[in-house]
Image (cartoon, grey):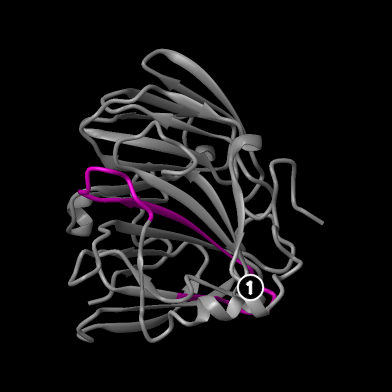
């Protein structure tokens, strides 16, 4: 059974895409993507969940949390700049408004309440990871190393230039066998074309997911706006075809007492990490910064 959802499959009356733990068949991770042009505002009560709101292609976003207003500068697209973002506490009432554009409300079941926090784009760590054709950009939004003020949720973005791969070597964090890390993971893809600022209808990539026992092995084309849910198994590579850069937003959460982004490589491919020391990183990366696309 595939866990791939094409753009539009998860649409609701007020969201471009919505993933709940119940729908996914797991316990923690969730996500909603809103187009602010479609409604004057969106209101959510975070009952039993915490959230991270990330502008994707929206600027001048107003987020009201329990009556207090916060403004996010946002960005015109995921391939244009790194965005500021806001952490939303467990149990809070949130209203999101803006003139137009796309925002993602990443969420997780939570037990401990943390305070609201607005993080400026300039303070979001950008990492260039890998080497050669496996070079990619990882923007660490709310990860254990970049943001401590959360209970369960982890959020990051990955940009892969056209012709490169990411999610490589294949890895997992499903708690099966000797792999101790446990995280349920959502991939939300936006596929660009050449120098597009955001997703493009012609965008095309590839993605592989396979289980430890070999009972499932899927390699599928990825189009702009697709969502893939990963409850278990190895995932990777994510392949950006030439001229079509790939972006994905990752939402991860799990039952362990401490938040973690740890993973277990497929042992058949783990050696690749050692080979990176002999290759140069792709000079096209990082692709974005807090200001704009890096030239």
From the viewer's side, name the closer residue of 212 and 202: 212
Q: Is residue 125 above or below residue 194?
A: above
- Identify the residue at horizontal 47%, vertical 82% (top origin): 271
From the viewer's side, name the closer residue of 169 and 22: 169
Which residue is at the far right? Answer: 295
How would you rate the neighbour count of disc 1 (Cα within 10 Å): few for under 14, some for 14-19, many for 20 or more? many
- Check the picture and name the quadrant holding the N terminus: bottom left
- Identify the residue at horizontal 69%, vertical 41% (top origin): 290
Q: Which residue is mark 1?
A: 131
Please tell me whether mark 1 sits on a helix, a strand or a loop: loop
Q: Is residue 275 above or below residue 291?
A: below
- Check the picture and name the quadrant holding the C terminus: bottom right
Q: Which percent across, then down, holds residue 117?
A: 46, 25
Is residue 256 shown in magenta? Answer: yes
Q: Is residue 4 left or right of residue 98?
A: left
> Dividing the picture into quarters, in which one does residue 291 lie?
top right
- Identify the residue at horizontal 66%, vertical 69% (top origin): 161
> Dividing the picture into quarters, in which one does residue 75 lie?
top right
Q: Which percent across, then down, holds residue 48?
A: 21, 33
Which residue is at the far top? Answer: 67
Q: Which percent across, then down, holds residue 158?
A: 54, 59
Q: Is residue 151 above or below residue 228?
A: above
Residue 46 shows in the view: yes
Residue 42 shows in the view: no
Q: Is residue 11 left or right of residue 159?
A: left
Question: Which residues make up the magenta segment?
Answer: 237-261
Is residue 24 shown in magenta? Answer: no
Q: Which percent across, then down, holds residue 116?
A: 41, 23
């Amino acid at each position: 059974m595939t866990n791939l959802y094409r753009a539009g499959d998860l649409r609701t009356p007020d969201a471009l895409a919505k993933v709940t733990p119940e729908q996914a068949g797991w316990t923690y991770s969730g996500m909603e993507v809103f187009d602010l042009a479609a409604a004057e505002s969106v209101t959510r009560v975070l009952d039993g969940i915490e959230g991270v709101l990330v502008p994707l292609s929206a600027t001048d976003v107003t987020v009201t949390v329990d009556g207090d207003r916060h403004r996010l500068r946002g960005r015109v697209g995921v391939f244009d700049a790194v965005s500021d973002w806001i952490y939303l506490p467990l149990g809070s009432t949130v209203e999101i408004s803006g003139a137009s554009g796309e925002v993602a409300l990443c969420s997780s079941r939570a037990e401990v309440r943390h305070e609201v926090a607005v993080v400026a784009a300039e303070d979001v760590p950008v990492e260039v990871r890998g080497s050669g054709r496996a070079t990619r950009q990882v923007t660490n939004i709310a990860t254990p190393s970049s943001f401590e003020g959360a209970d369960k949720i982890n959020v990051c973005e990955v940009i892969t230039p056209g012709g490169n791969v990411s999610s490589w070597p294949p890895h997992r964090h499903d708690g099966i066998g000797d792999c101790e890390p446990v995280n349920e993971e959502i991939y939300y893809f936006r596929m660009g074309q050449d120098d597009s600022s955001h997703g493009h209808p012609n965008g095309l990539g590839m993605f592989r997911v396979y289980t430890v026992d070999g009972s499932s092995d899927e390699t599928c084309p990825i189009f702009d706006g697709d969502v893939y849910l990963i409850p278990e198994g190895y995932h990777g590579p994510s392949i950006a075809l030439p001229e079509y850069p790939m972006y994905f937003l990752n939402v991860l959460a799990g039952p362990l007492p401490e938040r973690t982004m740890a993973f277990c490589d497929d042992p058949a491919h783990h050696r690749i990490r050692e080979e990176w020391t002999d290759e140069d990183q792709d000079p096209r990366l990082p692709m974005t910064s807090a200001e704009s696309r890096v030239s």
